[in-house]
Image (cartoon, rainbow, N blue to C red):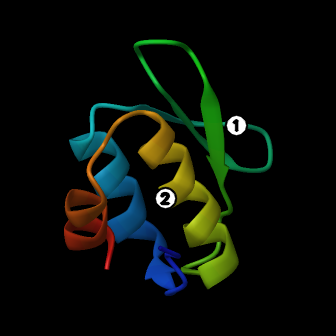
Amino acid sequence: MGFLFPAKRNKLISALKRFGLSVFEGGNHTCAKCIINGQKTTIPRHNDIKREVVDKICKFLLKKNFKEEEIIKFIK
């Protein structure tokens, strides 16, 4: 399934923190780091995050064994 829906930046960051990712500010983007394996994803600093970016971040979370229903519930 695709996660093609836009999201608000604050809601997306809040969801990533809720999933246990470490969120910190980088040079040009906000970064979210998986504490278990150290992999990172980036979030642009726009108030509205495009659906293509949300889709990639959600797929990143799926690879970390988070459930699709939880991802949609917290981000959408």
Instruction: Give the residue type that dot 1 points to.
Output: Gly
Examine the rendered structure and indicate whether residue 11 appears above or below residue 42. Answer: below
Q: Position of residue 37 (x, y in %)?
A: 51, 12
Q: In the figure, residue 17 lies in which quadrant?
A: top left
In the rendered image, the vertical position of residue 39 relative to residue 37, given as above or below: below
Locate the C terminus by quadrant.
bottom left
Q: Residue at x 26, y 50 (%)?
A: 67
Query: Residue 47, percent across and down?
Result: 55, 79
The answer to whether residue 76 is visible is yes
Which mark is drawn over residue 57? none
Q: Is residue 50 visible?
A: no
The one nearer the camera, 41 or 63, is 63
Residue displayed at 20% across by 59% down? 70
The extreme front residue here reads: 1
**Of the residues under marks 1 and 2, which one precedes in the sequence?**
1
Q: Nearer the viewer, mark 1 or mark 2?
A: 2
Kindly check if marks 1 and 2 are in contact, taking CB atoms under 8 A apart as contact: no
Image coords of residue 72 (percent x, y): 29, 71
Residue 58: mark in rendering: 2
Residue 26 numbered mark, or none: 1
Q: Is residue 10 left or right of residue 19?
A: right
